Amino acid sequence: MSRVFITGASSGIGAELARVYARRGDQLGLVARREDALEALRSQLPGAHTIYALDVRDRQALHAAARDFLSAGPVDVVVACAGISAGTLTEEIEDFEVFESIIATNLNAMVATFEPFVAPMKRCRSGTLVGVGSVAGIRGLPGSGAYSASKAAVRNYCESLRIELRASGVRVVTLAPGFIRTPMTEHNPYKMPFLMPVQAFAERAVQAIDKAVPYKIIPWQMAWVAALLRIVPDAWYDTLAARGQRKPRVRR
């Protein structure tokens, strides 16, 4: 039995990862803002699991939850899955608060999630830290500056951490989902190529985590798209991307 700590666990990718791990007989620490959603998820899972209702932007509360889960024994896997998305425009002054919230949730909270677990994992010389990024971090998307920036930062942060911990026995995995059918994507007003059911994503993600794959894009078709995006000249990319539909802004 492994012990797994997951943020963003109340819905979408986080909830589905919890289901996969619970079916394997693992013991879970589940973090999200909505206690009712966490309770509903826990009632569906086999085994006994611990829930922590908190906002991952609250570093002290997150650390307290981590310490509580660690008090019951070593933790094998930590998945920083909490994330939010919204359209943002730099010209709209009020979007700065949305930008701050996205960065705080998608990037800063990931660092805060990992912080309490690094030293215990290093002492055990085992454990895996998992950061959930996105293919949106490969190239900047118009109208999604905050989200693209946060996910590009996640990729580079996790790569830095992976190298820092290389000799320690602690592994770092970055997952980069393409379009996954979750509440976050269900209202996107544009076509989503290779849209993948969240259940299929979670199964493949856990396989990648088990193998400690450093960086994994899922589904595989999006890995080919990402490879092409990296080599497309800027002028070509700008012309193509400018034609695409944009994620709606949060109206205040």
Image (cartoon, rainbow, N blue to C red):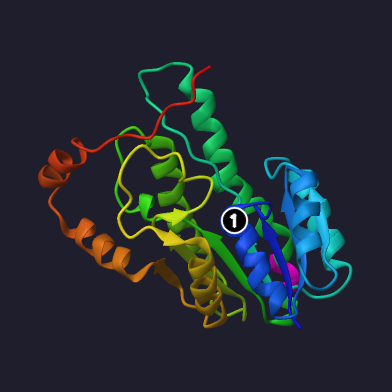
Q: Residue 18's spot in the image, x, y percent? A: 67, 65
Q: Quadrant of residue 218?
A: bottom left
Residue bearing the label numbered 1: 81
Q: Residue 7's spot in the image, x, y percent? A: 67, 55
Query: Height in image: 107 above or below 211?
Result: above
**Left or right of 199 on screen, residue 219:** left
Query: Height in image: 240 above or below 22?
Result: above
Q: Is residue 76 visible?
A: no
Span colored in magenta: 118-122
Residue type, numbered disc 1: Cys
**Magenta highlight: main SS:** helix
Secondary structure type for disc 1: loop
**Left or right of 3 on screen, residue 169:** left
Q: Is residue 220 visible?
A: yes
Query: Height in image: 3 above or below 158?
Result: below
Is 131 a magenta residue? no
